[in-house]
Amino acid sequence: MKTICLTGMMGSGKTTIAKLLSKSSGIKVVDTDSLIVENEGMEISEIFKQKGEAYFRQVEKDAIKNAFQPENMVISLGGGAFEDEDTRNFLLNNSDVIYLQTSAKIIYERLKNDKSRPLLCGNMSVERIAEIIKKRENNYLSANKIIDTDNKSPKEIVAELSND
């Protein structure tokens, strides 16, 4: 089975869906954010604070390429990982990229009490989330498949992916 990469906004369910896909199919799962935290020895919000977003994005790019296997893997990407053109092209050419499309309102409801999101720190609002989605959407829409996750349970999304 070709590697599956899940992309989409923070709070779209990438980590949850990746774990469920891994469990149902027995393939390896890699969560790039968790991998970065492990490699760097600090939370992502701390990396942003201490070293900046540019540093984080380079570490993220390296982590994806180092962990990547062309088959039998599901990768949960960080919300901004698909913004990097090299990373995006690499993943589109070597895996099945699935965009978990989620509305700003749903993401807000999922994240409104989460203080660990550096891009929303101090500005947690539906409007701010919609602004980030708008900025990233053209890249997200280049994915091989788009799944609207609004009003679907994680199990329903995994079933939709498994039917392909």
Image (spheres, rainbow, N blue to C red):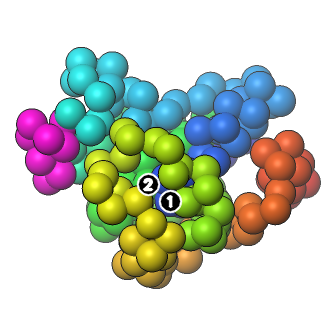
Residue span colored magenta: 47-54
Q: Residue placed at 77% from the left, 25% from the top? A: 23
Q: Residue placed at 12% from the left, 47% from the top? A: 52
Q: Main SS of the magenta segment? A: helix
Q: Position of residue 69 (x, y in %)?
A: 50, 35
Earlier residue among tags 2 and 1: 1
User: In what element is the residue under mark 2?
Assistant: loop
Q: Quadrant of residue 122?
A: bottom left
Q: Quadrant of residue 144?
A: bottom right
Q: Locate residue 66 relative to residue 126 in the image: left or right.
A: left
Which part of the image, by quadrant, shows the N terminus?
top right
Q: Position of residue 79 (x, y in %)?
A: 44, 54
| Residue placed most toward the observer, 62 or 9 | 9
The reply to whether the magenta stretch includes residue 121 is: no
Q: Quick check: 141 above or below 70?
A: below
The reply to whether the magenta stretch includes residue 51 is: yes
Q: Is residue 139 visible?
A: no
Which part of the image, by quadrant, shows the C terminus?
bottom right
Q: Quick check: 42 above or below 136?
A: above
Task: In the rendered structure, find residue 79 and report the number of the disc placed on it.
Answer: 2
Q: Residue placed at 24% from the left, 18% from the top? A: 41
Which amino acid, by three-letter code, is at mark 2? Gly
Task: In the rendered structure, find residue 9 and report the number of the disc placed on it.
Answer: 1
- Image mark count: 2
User: In what element is the residue under mark 1?
Assistant: loop
Q: Position of residue 17 (x, y in %)?
A: 70, 42
Q: Quick check: 53 above or below 30?
A: below
**Circles 2 and 1: CB atoms closer than 8 Å:** yes
Which amino acid, by three-letter code, is at mark 1? Met
* Mark pair 2, 1: CA separation: 5 Å
